[in-house]
Image (cartoon, rainbow, N blue to C red):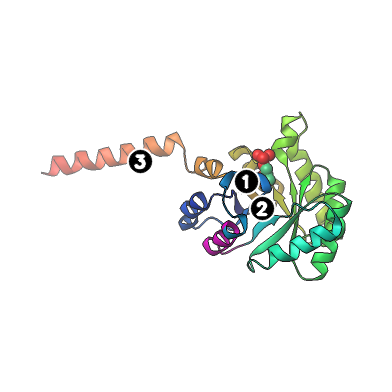
Amino acid sequence: MKLFVDSGNVADIAGLVPLGIIDGVTTNPSLLAKAGGDSRAILKEICQTVQGPVSAEVVATDVNGMIQEGRELAGIDEHIVVKVPFGKPGVQACGKLADEGIRVNVTLVFSSTQALLAAKVGATFVSPFVGRLDDVATSGMELISQIVDIYDNYEFSTEVLVASIRGPLHIVEAGRLGADVCTCPPAVIEALFRHPLTDIGLAKFLADWEKAQGAKG
Ligand code: G3P
């Protein structure tokens, strides 16, 4: 499974990259607004920090605007994947950009039929938002299961990018279902490193070692 960082914060991303577990980055207008500054410069810096796909979302809402903005975003760096929101304009723009060889991530996906349409127009990634579905008492992971099944049945090459992840259990379930990518806020990736039994075990190993050294001396 690929692990992406869901963030527009270059420092947070740069702190995780040396671990060797980060395969890409996703951003969205909210995350880039939070980061502040010149969003295109930030996207370029992210692309130089991570050697993998970096999703950058259009804010245009009409087909031609999305295509134009998508081409501009793709021109920032070869790692850019253009993110378009699901809908008629997004689906149409995705098809056109994909025909031009630009990789597209169709975002704001909340149903398997939306994911089916995204795959049909050549999306490289589809982004179902599991946390936001859970928030409204609908199983985000059931949606992932449906999309994985449908894509497998028809051998679509679109990758299932699980988004709106809120904690490690979402990653466990996504992995069991065979989702291609999980994009996670930095705090969730940090949480994957923590386990109290690992900490207790290490403290005991080191204490036993020190005791033995003392006994020898
Ligand atoms: O990038 C899209 C997505 O991951 C948003 O997550 O937590 O705002 O629902 P969230």
Q: Which residue is denoted by mark 3 in the rendering?
A: 202
Q: Position of residue 72 (x, y in %)?
A: 71, 65
**Quarter residue 135 falls in:** top right
Q: Is residue 71 magenta?
A: no
Q: Which residues are magenta?
A: 42-52
Residue 8 versus residue 143: which sits nearer the camera? 8
Left or right: 157 with respect to 214?
right
Q: Give the residue type at disc 2.
A: Val
Residue 29 versus residue 14: which sits nearer the camera? 29
Q: Position of residue 200 (x, y in %)?
A: 37, 35
Marked residue nearer the N-terminal end (3 or 2): 2
Q: Secondary structure at mark 1?
A: helix
Q: Position of residue 206 (x, y in %)?
A: 28, 41
- Circles 2 and 1, Cβ within 8 Å, touching? The answer is no
Q: Give the residue type at disc 3.
A: Leu
Q: Which residue is denoted by mark 2 in the rendering?
A: 181
Q: Give the residue type at disc 1.
A: Ala
Marked residue nearer the N-terminal end (1 or 3): 1
Indicate the quadrant containing the C terminus: top left, top right, bottom left or bottom right: top left
**Does the numbered disc 3 mark a residue whose Cβ is under 8 Å from ligand 1?**
no
Q: How many marks?
A: 3
Residue drawn at (63%, 67%) of the image = 77
Left or right: 194 with respect to 74?
left
Q: Which residue is denoted by mark 1 in the rendering?
A: 33
Q: Position of residue 39 (x, y in %)?
A: 61, 55
Marked residue nearer the N-terminal end (2 or 1): 1
